[in-house]
Image (spheres, rainbow, N blue to C red):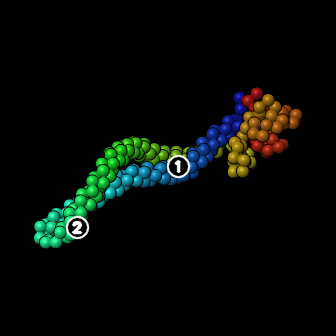
């Protein structure tokens, strides 16, 4: 069994490692939230683009229908004028104009039939996109809210751990605590206190010296000659 000071240090380390993990997790949340926002904007843009495609086709159809109205109005006017003209060549020209308008109207009506079919396809696709994206938006919104909630939970737990930490310092010698704190703030981000594993340091996995093994067997804490992390053994 570990000595009291080692047990006290292990409890402190468990708290500090949990606190570190929570802080590290919290730092990644803003980026995750940004990704969700970007996905939301992309989904909204895709839905708007599909709806805009429908609107453009409807406007195109309306424009073609307007052309038919204009041609019909022009033909009616020519027909009215033809009753007043006295020269045969003018009369024939008006009849030709009416015939041309009728031909143009026929072509436009054929085009309209094609456009109406296209409109139905575009409408169906726009509705499919709207439904699919609406479902994805709901999922994204839920994920966003869950992340916000988790962020607050992390903050609350970190605050609780920080408040509990001073009580765990009792029973740990000042010099040992200083060594521990220095390792805790080290660049390798490993646990300051590690267990001996098959004669090797639990942090760098280098084999320890016989002298270190002898000291560990007495229940002492020793520093690894390679990485300086504190080593203990339960044997």
Q: Is residue 52 left or right of residue 216?
A: left
**Circle 1 is placed at which residue position?**
32
Q: Tell which tag, 1 or 2, sits nearer the viewer.
A: 2
Residue at far right of view: 210
Q: Are marks 1 and 2 in contact (CB under 8 Å)?
A: no
Residue at far front of view: 88
Q: Quadrant of the N terminus?
A: top right
Look at the picture and state if 134 lies above or below 87: above
* Alpha-carbon span between mark 1 and mark 2: 73 Å
Residue shown at the point (46%, 52%) measured from the top left: 42
Q: Is residue 79 left or right of residue 211?
A: left
Q: Position of residue 123 (x, y in %)?
A: 34, 47
Determine which quarter of the picture holds residue 96: bottom left
Judging depth in this view, the residue of 10 and 74 nearest the camera is 74
Q: Position of residue 66 (x, y in %)?
A: 25, 60
Q: Which mark is residue 51?
A: none
Residue shown at the point (15%, 67%) measured from the top left: 82
Q: How many marks on residues? A: 2
**Circle 2 is placed at which residue position?**
93
Residue shown at the point (61%, 46%) measured from the top left: 20
Disc 2 secondary structure class: helix
Q: Position of residue 141 (x, y in %)?
A: 42, 46
Task: Sort mark 2 into few (<14), some (14-19) or many (20+) by Cα contacts within 10 Å.
Answer: few
Look at the picture and state if 146 lies above or below 216: below
Judging depth in this view, the residue of 75 and 204 nearest the camera is 75
Q: Position of residue 192 (x, y in %)?
A: 71, 43
Task: Sort mark 1 into few (<14), some (14-19) or many (20+) by Cα contacts within 10 Å.
Answer: some
Determine which quarter of the picture holds residue 140: top left
């Amino acid at each position: 069994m570990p000595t009291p000071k080692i047990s006290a240090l292990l409890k402190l380390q468990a708290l500090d490692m949990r606190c570190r993990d929570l802080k590290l997790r919290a730092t990644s949340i803003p980026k995750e939230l940004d990704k969700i926002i970007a996905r939301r904007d992309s989904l909204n843009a895709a839905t708007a683009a599909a709806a805009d495609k429908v609107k453009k086709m409807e406007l195109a159809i309306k424009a073609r229908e307007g052309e038919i109205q204009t041609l019909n109005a022009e033909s009616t006017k020519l027909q009215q004028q033809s009753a007043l003209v006295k020269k045969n060549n003018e009369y024939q020209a008006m009849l030709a104009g009416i015939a041309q308008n009728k031909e143009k109207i026929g072509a436009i009506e054929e085009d309209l039939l094609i456009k109406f079919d296209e409109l139905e396809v575009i409408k169906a696709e726009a509705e499919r996109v709207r439904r699919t994206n609406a479902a994805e938006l709901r999922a994204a919104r839920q994920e966003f809210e869950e992340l916000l909630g988790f962020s607050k939970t992390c903050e609350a737990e970190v605050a609780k751990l920080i408040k509990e930490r001073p009580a765990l310092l009792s029973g740990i010698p000042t010099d040992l605590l200083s060594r521990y704190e220095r390792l805790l703030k080290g660049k390798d981000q490993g646990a300051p206190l590690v267990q001996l594993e098959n004669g090797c340091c639990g942090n760098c996995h280098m084999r320890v010296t016989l002298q270190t093994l002898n000291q560990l067997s007495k229940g002492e804490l020793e520093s690894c000659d390679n990485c300086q992390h504190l080593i203990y053994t339960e044997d």
